[in-house]
Image (cartoon, rainbow, N blue to C red):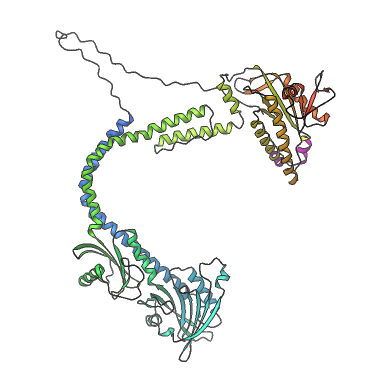
Amino acid sequence: MYKESSGPPDAAGRPSFAHVTTPLPPSPSPSSAEIPPPRRPRRFRVDVGSIVSAVALAQSLLLVTLGYWGSQRLVTTIGTSAHKSNHDRTEDKVLAFLAKAESAVGAIGSSPSLTPAGENVDRTAELLWTLLQQSPELDSVYVANVEGKMLMALRYPVPAIRHIARGDGFTTETWQYKLPLGSEADVQQRFATQRVEAYRSNYNPTQRSWFVQARKTQGPVWTVPYVFAAAQELGVTYALPSQRRQAEGSPQAMVVAGDVSLGRLSEFVRLFSRNGNGNSALLSADHKVLARSDMPGVLHTLEAPTGALGALNAQMVADGIAGSGSDKAFAFSHEGRRYLVQASRIPATGWQLVSWVPEDVLLGGLRRAVAWSLLLALVFLGLALYMSLKLSKLVTAPVENLSRIAHRIGRLELDDLPREPSRVLEIQHLDQALDDSARSLKAFSKFVPVDVINQLVAQGHALAPNGSPRQVTVMFTDVEGFTSISESIAADVLVRQLTDYFNLAAAVFARHGGVIDKFIGDGIMVLWGAPADLEDAEYKACRAALELHAEMHQLNRQWAEQGLPEFRTHIGIHTGVVVAGVLGSNDRLSYTAFGDVVNVASRIEGANRQLGTRMLISEVTYAALNGRLATRRIEELVELRGRQTRMVLHELLT
C-alpha cells in the first residue's frame, strides 16, 4: 500500500484595516476664510457588543415598565392558580389511588371461580395473593359469604393467607404465612406457605360494616373509617357484592372487599405541603379528620378538626358548602391571619379534600418581588451593558476557539480536538463542520502517514515530487509460507491474523524509531533515519527485530491455542545511502526510499529461506553494532538473488 500526501495549505495572514478621513476642499465663497472647511463625516461603525448592549438596554426599560404595570394585576391570579394547581394535583392522586383500589376489587369480583371455601379455594387464594402483589394501594383483599366463611390475603401486619370459618358460637381462623411481597424469590416460592397457625376467635365477617353495607345497598360502597381487626389501624374498606350459584344450583351471596389504611392516604395529603405552600386535609362525610399534612404521623382515632382546619371547617358548615359536590374557593380569617382555601369533594367516598394557605405566604413573595423590581430597575440597567458584553463573548470567543481548532486541523493534529458547544446556531454549524472535517481527515490518516507529512512540513520540504540522498537503515520482513497459509484458512480469519500481526509490528517499530514505508502483502518495509535523522539507527533497527521476534513468539502461542497457523517472520536489515523523498505524480504522492540499499535489504530477507535463519543483517549494519548484540557470522559468502557479488551476512541471535 502506498501513502498519499497533499500539499500544505497556503499560509493566511490577517489583514489590518485603517480608516482615514480626508477633509473636503472648501467651497468657493466670499466667506470661506471665516468658516472652517467642512469635514466628511466619519462612517458609523458598530461591533457585536454595542448592538447587544443597545438591545439589552431598550428591552430592560420596556420590560420593567410593562412588568410593573401588569404584575400588580397578575399577582393574585398567579398565586391563586398555583394554590389550586397543587390542590388539584393532590386530588388527582387521591382519586387515582381509590380508582386503582376499586379496579383491583372489581377484578376479584368478576372471577368465575371465586369462593371463600370449597374445592376452588386454592385458586381463589392464588388470585387474591396475585392481585395484592400488583395493587400496592391495598393492604388486604378478601371475599366472604353469608355462611360466615371468608378468605383473605394480607400485606400488613404480616403477609399471609387468612382462612375464616364461622361455627356455632366461635370462629376458626387459619393463618398461612408467606414470604414478604418484596422478596427476590420466584413466584411459586413467594406463595409457598412458610408456617401455619390456627386458633379460635369471635370474628364474624357477616356482621362487619363492609359486609352489611354492601349487602344492604347491593352495590359498591366505601365504608366509614374504622379500626381493622388484623392490623389494628384506622382505615376504610371498598366492598362489592357478588352473587353466585353453588354447584347444586342454589344461589350464594358473597362480598368482595379491599382495605386501605389511612396511613396511605396521609402520604397523598402530605404531598401538598411538600409541593407547595400551605397544608391540606381529608375530612370524612361527618367532618372527622382522616388525614392532615400539618400534623405528623398517622391518625389512630377519628377526631374533629382543630386549629386553622377547625375554623375552616366551621366556616364551610356555616356557608353550607361542607360536603358540596362542586369545587369551592374562598377566604377566611383565623387568629388575625387571612387564609385562601380550595375545597373539593371525593365523589366515591363522600370525603372532602381541603387545602389552605396564608395569603401573605402565597402572595407576599410576589408582591415583594414587584416592589423590589422597581428598586432593582436601575441596577438592571447598569448591568445591561456588562451583560451585553458577556453575551457578545458567546459569539466572539467561540469563533476564536474555532479558528484555533481549524489551525490544528490544518497541521493534521487530529487527536483530542476539543468541541466548542454554543447556543448560537451558526457557531454550532461551524463547529459541526470542523468536527466532520477532522473526522474525515482522521479516517484518511489511516491511509496516509501523517507523522511523515508533519515532519516534512516542519523541515520545510515541499510536498511535491523530490528526493535527496540519505543514510538509512532499511528492514524488510516477510511471513514464511504465507501463500500456503492463505490457502488453508478462511479469508476473514486470515485478515484478522494479519491485522494482529501488523498492529504488533507497527507498535514495535514505533517504539524504536522506525517509520513504516509500506505494507507489501504480508511483508513490511521499514526505514530508520528517514524522513528525519536518527542516531544509532542500526542498533535500534536490530533491537526492533529482536523484540518483534520475541513478541511474535507469544502471539504464535496464542494462535496455536486457537488452532490457527503460526507466522514465522523473516527479517533482513541493511544500511547505506538511499534516495529518500516524496515520489509520485502531481496529485498522488508517496514518501519512500529507493536505491541499491533497499534492494539489498530485500534480498537479505529472502536469504533466510536458503540459510534456514530468521534474522539476517549486512556487514555494514553489523559493524555499527560494535558487539552490543549477540550475532553469528555466516561463514560462507552468501549469493543474493539478482546480484553478481556475494555478501558477508550475520544472524541476529535471540
Looking at the image, can residue 301 be seen? yes
Closest to the observer, 598 or 86: 598
Question: Please, is residue 625 above or below residue 21 in the view?
Answer: below
Which residue extends farthest bottom? 168
Question: Please, is residue 553 above or below residue 594 in the view?
Answer: below
Q: Tell me if 34 is positioned left or right of 150 in this view.
A: left
The quadrant of the picture occupied by the N terminus is: top right
Residue 484 shown in magenta: yes
Q: Tell me if 87 is positioned left or right of 529 in this view.
A: left
Residue 425: quadrant of the picture: top left
User: Residue, x 51% and y 67% (percent of image)?
Assistant: 182
Q: Main secondary structure of the magenta part?
A: helix
Q: Tell me if 398 is positioned left or right of 519 in this view.
A: left
User: Residue, x 61% and y 28% (percent of image)?
Assistant: 449
Question: Please, is residue 645 above or below residue 232 in the view?
Answer: above
Residue 319: quadrant of the picture: bottom left
Q: x%, y% of residue 519?
A: 68, 30
Residue 218: quadrant of the picture: bottom left
Q: x%, y% of residue 478?
A: 74, 31
User: Residue, x 26% and y 56% (percent of image)?
Assistant: 79
Looking at the image, can residue 520 be seen? no
Q: x%, y% of residue 548?
A: 71, 34
Count of all numbered marks drawn on residues in the image = 0
Closest to the observer, 179 or 72: 179
Q: Tell me if 588 is positioned left or right of 397 in this view.
A: right
The quadrant of the picture occupied by the C terminus is: top right
The magenta span reads 483-495
Q: x%, y% of residue 91?
A: 34, 64
